[in-house]
Amino acid sequence: MTTITGIDELRAAAGTELGVTEWHEITQAQVDAFADATGDHQWIHVDPARAKDSPLGGTIAHGLLTLSLAPAMTAALLSFEGFAFALNYGYNRVRFPGPLPVGSRVRMRATLATVEDIPGGAQVTIVQTFEREGVDKPVCVAESLARVYVRA
């Protein structure tokens, strides 16, 4: 866990890897719950019998389900202290270069890529790379944006 205390320490951390999370297993129940929450019931995610005969050999997690793991995984790697507050600002780029089959395990590697001054604080870009166990190609790569504000 990396704890960043204050704006000067944040600026100094730009360009550093924050670490790698623990592995998280993707279950069919999790995929089904995500499908119910989003209304995305495409068969490659929720129909194991049909998906078994696909080129992927089974159901896969939604790309956005993978991305939705980012807040909890980031919190396991990074905390901010000495700021008034921090919040998610969005994403610049998100790609899903490989599938994430149900039953596989995923983890996230994070790098604090840039820190840019904004009025009242800083905008932070964190490159989040989601890795599937046993596979070299990532399943998701995203540039997450967060904003931190200093105490007035």
Image (tube, grey):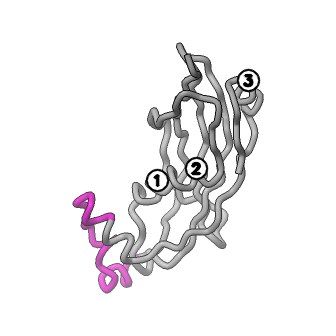
Quadrant hosting residue 123:
top right
Asked whether the beta carbons under mark 2 and mark 1 sit within 8 Å of each other, the answer is no
Up the image or down, 133 lies above or below 130; here it is: below
**Which SS does the magenta portion mostly show?**
helix
> To which residue does mark 2 refer?
74
Quadrant hosting residue 47:
bottom left
The residue shown at (55%, 24%) is 149
- Say if the magenta span includes residue 19: no
Q: Residues within 10 Å of mark 1 (few under 14, many from 20)?
A: many
Of 77 and 85, the residue lying toward us: 85
> To which residue does mark 3 refer?
8
Residue 110: x percent and y percent?
65, 48
The type of residue carrying mark 2 is Thr
Residues in magenta, as a range: 34-54
Query: Could you tell me how far apart the alpha carbons at marks 1 and 3 are, in whole angstroms?
Result: 29 Å
Up the image or down, 18 lies above or below 103; here it is: above
**Mark 1 / mark 3, whichever is N-terminal:** 3
Asked whether the beta carbons under mark 1 and mark 3 sit within 8 Å of each other, the answer is no
The type of residue carrying mark 3 is Asp
The residue shown at (39%, 75%) is 59
Task: Classify residue 50 as left or right of residue 64.
Answer: left
